Image: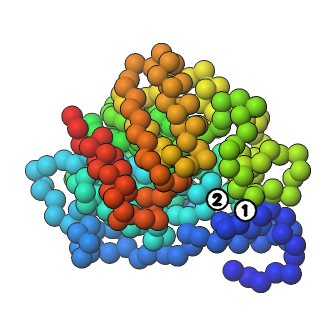
């Protein structure tokens, strides 16, 4: 990070600061864990460039020992961070995906989409859709990536993500339902502590993240992240942010959804609202919800060995592996 004497224009501490001279100071998720083949963790990883023109890339995860006669479920994962933070390469997400792949015995693709504010939303959606298209291009033995061609079961494809990544997973599943995935079966999505809009304009977020962003006209709380990351948004009823405003919700392109919420998370009520709205939308699939008591937003990423994080992991693994 370069030093600056400029004033803070947007303050999302302890996560992000943006200065009047344009400097972006990310306070978490900037470290990089190198990929490793046959790692002592039991999981091999490697990085691929998906779209050189935009820089979209991904980290692939595979159990060290794979039966060549067995196809594994394929998970495409989208990290959280308010569309502005982290990557598949930082320790937070590298370690989490490593544990999930080992526990579930799956192949995973963790997508590195472009971040706001340098690349405002919809860049994150566009990049994530491009990555999903790249993944499904490997069905029927096609494509250039052997881990996907040789080991992935394209009839058992899942999308998952936490926070903003949960939002991305949902929006891509809607797009897949509308446009299709070329014969690939999107079996389910798992949205963990998803970052969605509230029920109505009057339902102000219960927890203020102190992110005034220098704009006295915006409401307090987590909604500031959306307004900041997507300056061209139509507002809090943008269907990308508030699924209840999306007329295409019933076309969600998977057969099952797992929604995970946490009792002390400012986004808890929004997760429950998504669960209830999806259940009444006319969508023909099955939606489940799991609430973790006594924990806050994405606690499992920062306390992965605690009992409640282990329970959450087991529920996600069961969701992916149940027939």
Q: CA distance from mark 2 to mark 1?
A: 11 Å
Q: Residue at x 62, y 54 (%)?
A: 83
Q: Relative to residue 45, is residue 23 drawn left or right? A: right
Figure label count: 2
The quarter holding residue 108 reads bottom left
The quarter holding residue 126 reads top right
Image vertical order of residue 207 relative to residue 259, above or below:
below
Q: Residue furthest bottom?
A: 3
Q: Is residue 175 visible?
A: no
Q: Relative to residue 261, is residue 11 drawn left or right? A: right
Q: Which mark is residue 84?
A: 2
- Dot 2 lies on which element? loop
Q: Which mark is residue 183?
A: none
Q: Residue at x 53, y 53 (%)?
A: 297
Question: Which of these two is toward me, 119 or 244?
Answer: 244
Q: Residue furthest front?
A: 294
- Dot 1 lies on which element? strand
Q: Are marks 2 and 1 in contact (CB under 8 Å)?
A: yes
Q: Residue at x 81, y 57 (%)?
A: 213
Q: Relative to residue 249, is residue 12 drawn left or right? A: right
Q: For mark 1, does the 10 Å Cα neighbourhood hold few (<14), some (14 to 19), or many (20 or more) residues?
A: some
Q: Relative to residue 72, is residue 55 drawn left or right? A: right
Quadrant where the image shows the C terminus: top left
On the image, the x and y values in percent for residue 210 come to 75, 58
On the image, the x and y values in percent for residue 137 come to 37, 44
On the image, the x and y values in percent for residue 312 come to 36, 50
Question: Which of these two is toward me, 229 or 314?
Answer: 314
Q: Residue at x 12, y 56 (%)?
A: 67
Q: What residue is pinned by disc 1? A: 12
Q: Is residue 169 visible?
A: yes
- Decide which of tag 2 and tag 1 comes sooner along the chain: 1
Looking at the rendered image, the disc whose residue lies closer to the viewer, 2 or 1, is: 1
């Amino acid at each position: 990070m370069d030093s600056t004497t400029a004033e803070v224009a947007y303050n999302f501490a302890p996560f992000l600061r943006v200065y009047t001279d344009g400097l972006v100071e990310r306070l978490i998720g900037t470290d990089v864990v190198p990929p490793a083949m046959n790692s002592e963790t039991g999981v091999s990883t490697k990085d691929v460039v998906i779209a050189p023109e935009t820089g979209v890339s991904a980290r692939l995860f595979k159990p060290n020992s794979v039966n060549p006669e067995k196809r594994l479920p394929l998970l495409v994962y989208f990290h959280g961070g308010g569309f502005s933070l982290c990557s598949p390469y930082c320790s937070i997400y590298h370690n989490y995906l490593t544990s999930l792949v080992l526990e579930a015995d799956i192949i995973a693709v963790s997508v590195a989409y472009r971040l706001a504010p340098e690349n405002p939303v919809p860049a994150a959606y566009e990049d994530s859709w491009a990555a999903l298209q790249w993944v499904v291009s490997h069905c029927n033995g096609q494509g250039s990536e052997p881990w996907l061609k040789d080991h992935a079961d394209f009839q058992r494809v899942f999308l998952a993500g936490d926070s903003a990544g949960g939002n991305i997973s949902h929006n891509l599943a809607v797009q897949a339902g509308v446009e299709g995935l070329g014969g690939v079966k999107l079996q389910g999505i798992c949205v963990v502590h998803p970052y969605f809009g509230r029920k109505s304009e009057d339902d102000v977020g219960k927890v203020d993240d102190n992110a005034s962003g220098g704009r006295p006209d915006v409401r307090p709380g987590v909604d500031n992240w959306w307004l900041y990351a997507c300056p061209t948004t139509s507002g809090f009823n943008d269907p990308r942010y508030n699924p209840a405003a999306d007329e295409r919700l019933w076309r969600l392109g998977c057969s099952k959804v797992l929604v995970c919420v946490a009792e002390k998370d400012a986004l808890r009520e929004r997760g429950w609202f998504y669960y209830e709205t999806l259940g009444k939308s006319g969508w023909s699939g099955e939606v489940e919800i799991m609430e973790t008591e006594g924990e806050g937003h994405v606690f499992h990423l920062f306390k992965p060995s605690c009992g409640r994080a282990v329970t959450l992991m087991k529920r996600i693994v069961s969701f992916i592996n149940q027939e």
